[in-house]
Image: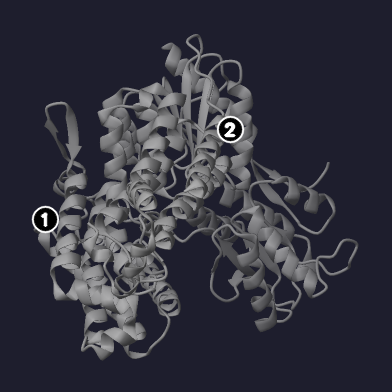
C-alpha cells in the first residue's frame, strides 16, 4: 500500500519535473509570431539556412521551429498545430514538395502568409494563394556548375585520363530517387559537361545513396573493388556523399593528403567539411548553395509580408519569370584563392 | 472491458486474493481501481500539465485534430495488437502500409493530372476499387508473416523483419515504375481527399470523418476480440499456446485468421493515410510500425502475451498522439521532444504493468 503511494508520488514528481523543463516559446504581443517547419534538422545544408534564419529573425519576431524528421505526415501534423496557434507568418521547407497542394489549402483557409523555401512547390499551387511565395535555387544550375567544373578539369589536364582512352569514366552518386534537386543535379552535371565537349562514360549504375555519407562510402568501396583503376571521376549530388566516396578512396590509398594519386571528386553544398577537404587537397571542388543568403532572404520576405509591405522591399532580390519565386544563385568553390 | 484479460494465466492465479485480510481487501480494491484506470489518469495528468503551461490548448478543435492525427496509426495499432497478444510483434506494418498507400494513391490520381501513373485511367474509378486492392495487398503481406510464424515457426520479429524489406523493395519498384521515374504519387482525386479529410459539424465541434473510421474499426475489432471464437482462442494461444493446442484450438488457423484481419486493417489505414497526407513516396510508412507498437504497449497490451484490450489500444494511441501534439503545441525544442517522449512512454508502461504484477 505504502509502496503504491510512493510510486504515485514519484509519477507526479517526474511529470511535473518534465513539464517544468519545457521551455515555452516566448509569446510577445509586440513581435509577430512566426512558425518555421523544417524538413529535417540533421541535414547539413538546411542547418546552415536554419541558423541564418534564426539569426536574421532574432529580435524581430518570436520564432517557433519544428523538425519534420523527413516525414510529410509529421510535418502536416506540425502545420496543424501552427495554424491552431494562429501564427502571424509561416516559413515552410516541405518534406515532399508534391504534397504542397494540401499544405497550401490549409494555410489559405487560415489566411496566414507563407514563404516556402528550398523544396519547390508546383507553380500553380504557389499561385493559388496570393500570400504565398518561394525562395529557392534553380536546381539545374548546381548541376550545370558541376558540368563546367568537369570541363575545366578535362581540358588541358591529360593526367586525369588514367587509361588514356580519351573518355572520362565517372561514377555518379544521387540523393533520393524521387527528389527533384537530385534528379536535376544528376542530369545537368553530365549534360553540361557533354555540351562542353567532354566525352563521359558512366561506370556501373547510378548509386542512389539518399544524401548519406555511410551509404556512399559502401557503394564506392564496392565500385572500386569491381572496377579497379577504371574510375577517373566522382560526381556527387551533395558533399556528404562526396565525403563518403573520399573515405572509400582513401582506404585504397588514393586521395590522401599529400599523396600522389588523386581522383577528382565534385560535390554540392560547400559544407564546412567539404571546404576543408578541398583546402587540404583531397577533394576537388564543390558548388556552394548560399545558405546564409537563403536564410536572410526568407526572413526579409516573411517580415515584409506580415507588415503588409511589398515583398522584396529593402532587399536586393528579384522575382524570376514566374513572379512568385526568388532564386538565390549558386557559386563554384575550388579552394582558397 | 476486463473479460479479454481473463486468460489462462490470470484464471490460474485468481485464487490467491482470498488470503488478504479484510482491511487490505478494501485497500486493494481501491488500489486496483486506481491501477485499472491508470491510463486515464496518465492522460489526465498530461492534459492538465499542458493546459497549465498553455491554457489555449483546451479546445474542441485541438481535440478533433489530435484524434484525426491518431486515426491511421490507431487502425494500424489495432492490427498489430493481435500479434503482440501472441507474444509476437510486427516490424513490417509501416512498410506494408507504404505499399498499400502507393496502390491507393496511384489508382486515385486525378484524371486531369498529365503525369499520372496510369494514363489509361481516364474516368475516375469508384473509390471502393483501390480500397479493396489496398486491403488485398495488406492481406497478402500479412499472410506471408503468418506463414513464417505459424508454419515455419519463425519468431515474428524475424519474419516481419524480412517482410519489411520485401515490402519496402516492392514499394520502391512500384514508385519507380512510373513513366517519369520515381516521382511522389500526388495530385489525388478530390472525391478521395474529401472522403478522407472531410468533417461534419455537430453543434459545438467539428468531427473529422477519420475519427469515425477509427471508432468503426475499433468497434468491429472489439466484437472480434470479445465475441468470436477467433478472438477468444487468440487470447488462449497468447497466454499459453501449448495448453491451447492441447485443449483443441487449431493454432495455425487462428494465427492466419488474426493476421488476415490485421491485413485488412493495414489496407484500410493505408487507404486513409494516402488521402490524409495527399502524397505517397518511398518514405511513406517509415517507423509507423514502431508508433503502433508503442501505442499498443502504452495501452496495456503486454509483450508477455495473452493480455490486452481494444479500449486500451485506443487509449495508448491517443496518449501517444497527445504527447506528440502537445510537444509541438508548446513549441518544445525538437531534440528535447524525443527525450520527453521516451520518458513518458517508460513511465506510462511502468505504471500500467503494475496491475498485472499486483495480480500475481
Between A76 and B210, the one nearer to me in the picture: B210
Residue holding disc 1: B124
Q: Residues within 10 Å of mark 1 (few under 14, many from 20)?
A: some
The tag on residue A164 is none
Instruction: Pinpoint residue B42: horizontal percent, then vertical percent.
Output: 40, 42
Residue B179 shows up from this direction: no
* Residue A202, x across and y down, in percent: 58, 72
- Asked if residue B47 lies left or right of residue B344, the reply is left
Q: Is residue A91 above or below residue A305?
A: below
Tell me residue B320's x, y (percent).
39, 47
Q: CA distance from mark 2 to mark 1?
A: 52 Å
Residue A160 figure quarter:
bottom right
Q: Which residue is mark 2?
A: A21
Q: Is residue A48 visible?
A: yes
Tag in front: 2 or 1? 2
- What residue lies at 68% left-to-right and 63% top-to-bottom? A244
Residue at 41% from the left image edge and 66% from the top image edge = B360
Whether the residues at callouts 2 and 1 have beta carbons within 8 Å, the answer is no
Amino acid at each position: 500500500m505504502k509502496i503504491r503511494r510512493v510510486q504515485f508520488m514519484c509519477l507526479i514528481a517526474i511529470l511535473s519535473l518534465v513539464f517544468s523543463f519545457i521551455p515555452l516559446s516566448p509569446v510577445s504581443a509586440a513581435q509577430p509570431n512566426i512558425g518555421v517547419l523544417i524538413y529535417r534538422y540533421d541535414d547539413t545544408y538546411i542547418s546552415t539556412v536554419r541558423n541564418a534564419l534564426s539569426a536574421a529573425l532574432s529580435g524581430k519576431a518570436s520564432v517557433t521551429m519544428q523538425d519534420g524528421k523527413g516525414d510529410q505526415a509529421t510535418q502536416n501534423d506540425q502545420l496543424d498545430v501552427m495554424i491552431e496557434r494562429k501564427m502571424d507568418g509561416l516559413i515552410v521547407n516541405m518534406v515532399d514538395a508534391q504534397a504542397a497542394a494540401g499544405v497550401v489549402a490549409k494555410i489559405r483557409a487560415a489566411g496566414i502568409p507563407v514563404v516556402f523555401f528550398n523544396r519547390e512547390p508546383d507553380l500553380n499551387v504557389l499561385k493559388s494563394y496570393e500570400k504565398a511565395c518561394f525562395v529557392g535555387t534553380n536546381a539545374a544550375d548546381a548541376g550545370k556548375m558541376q558540368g563546367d567544373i568537369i570541363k575545366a578539369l578535362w581540358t588541358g589536364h591529360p593526367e586525369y585520363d588514367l587509361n588514356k582512352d580519351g573518355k572520362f569514366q565517372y561514377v555518379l552518386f544521387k540523393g533520393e530517387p524521387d527528389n527533384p534537386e537530385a534528379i536535376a543535379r544528376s542530369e545537368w552535371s553530365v549534360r553540361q559537361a557533354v555540351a562542353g565537349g567532354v566525352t563521359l562514360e558512366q561506370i556501373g549504375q547510378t548509386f542512389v545513396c539518399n544524401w548519406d555519407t555511410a551509404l556512399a562510402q559502401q557503394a564506392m568501396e564496392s565500385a572500386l573493388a569491381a572496377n579497379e583503376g577504371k574510375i577517373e571521376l566522382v560526381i556527387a549530388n551533395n558533399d556528404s556523399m562526396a565525403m563518403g566516396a573520399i573515405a572509400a578512396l582513401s582506404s585504397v590509398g588514393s586521395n590522401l593528403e599529400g599523396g600522389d594519386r588523386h581522383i577528382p571528386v565534385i560535390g554540392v553544398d560547400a559544407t564546412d567539411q567539404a571546404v576543408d577537404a578541398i583546402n587540404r587537397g583531397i577533394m576537388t571542388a564543390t558548388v556552394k548553395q548560399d545558405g546564409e543568403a537563403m536564410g536572410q532572404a526568407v526572413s526579409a520576405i516573411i517580415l515584409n509580408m506580415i507588415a503588409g509591405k511589398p515583398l522584396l522591399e529593402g532587399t536586393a532580390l528579384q522575382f524570376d519569370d514566374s513572379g512568385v519565386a526568388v532564386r538565390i544563385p549558386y557559386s563554384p568553390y575550388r579552394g582558397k584563392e | 472491458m476486463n473479460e479479454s484479460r481473463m486468460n489462462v494465466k490470470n484464471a490460474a492465479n485468481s485464487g490467491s486474493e482470498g488470503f488478504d485480510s479484510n482491511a487490505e481487501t478494501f485497500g486493494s480494491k481501491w488500489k486496483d481501481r486506481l491501477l485499472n484506470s491508470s491510463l486515464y489518469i496518465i492522460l489526465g495528468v498530461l492534459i492538465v500539465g499542458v493546459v497549465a503551461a498553455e491554457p489555449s490548448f483546451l479546445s474542441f478543435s485541438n481535440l478533433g485534430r489530435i484524434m484525426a492525427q491518431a486515426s491511421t496509426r490507431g487502425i494500424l495499432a489495432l492490427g498489430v495488437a493481435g500479434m503482440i497478444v501472441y507474444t509476437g510483434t510486427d516490424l513490417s506494418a509501416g512498410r506494408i502500409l507504404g505499399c498499400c498507400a502507393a496502390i491507393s494513391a496511384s489508382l486515385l490520381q486525378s484524371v486531369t493530372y498529365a503525369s499520372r501513373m496510369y494514363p489509361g485511367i481516364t474516368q475516375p474509378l469508384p473509390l471502393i476499387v483501390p480500397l479493396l486492392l489496398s486491403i488485398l495487398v495488406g492481406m497478402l503481406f500479412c499472410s506471408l508473416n503468418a506463414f513464417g510464424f505459424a508454419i515455419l515457426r519463425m519468431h515474428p520479429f524475424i519474419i516481419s523483419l524480412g517482410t519489411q524489406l520485401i515490402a519496402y523493395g516492392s514499394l520502391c519498384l512500384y514508385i519507380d515504375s512510373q513513366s517519369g521515374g520515381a516521382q511522389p504519387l500526388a495530385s489525388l482525386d478530390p472525391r478521395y481527399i474529401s472522403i478522407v479529410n472531410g468533417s461534419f459539424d455537430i453543434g459545438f465541434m467539428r468531427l473529422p470523418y477519420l475519427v469515425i473510421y477509427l471508432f468503426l474499426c475499433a468497434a468491429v475489432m472489439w466484437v472480434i476480440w470479445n465475441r468470436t471464437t477467433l478472438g477468444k482462442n487468440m487470447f488462449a494461444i497468447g497466454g499459453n499456446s501449448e495448453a491451447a493446442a492441447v485443449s483443441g484450438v487449431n493454432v495455425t488457423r487462428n494465427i492466419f485468421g488474426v493476421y488476415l484481419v490485421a491485413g485488412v486493417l493495414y489496407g484500410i489505414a493505408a487507404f486513409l493515410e494516402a488521402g490524409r497526407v495527399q502524397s505517397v513516396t518511398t518514405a511513406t510508412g517509415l517507423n509507423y510500425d514502431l508508433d503502433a507498437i508503442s501505442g499498443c504497449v502504452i495501452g496495456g497490451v503486454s509483450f508477455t502475451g495473452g493480455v490486452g484490450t481494444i479500449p486500451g489500444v485506443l487509449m495508448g494511441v491517443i496518449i501517444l498522439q497527445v504527447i506528440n501534439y502537445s510537444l509541438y503545441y508548446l513549441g518544445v525544442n525538437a531534440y528535447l521532444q524525443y527525450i520527453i517522449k521516451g520518458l513518458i512512454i517508460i513511465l506510462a508502461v511502468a505504471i500500467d504493468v503494475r496491475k498485472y504484477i499486483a495480480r500475481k
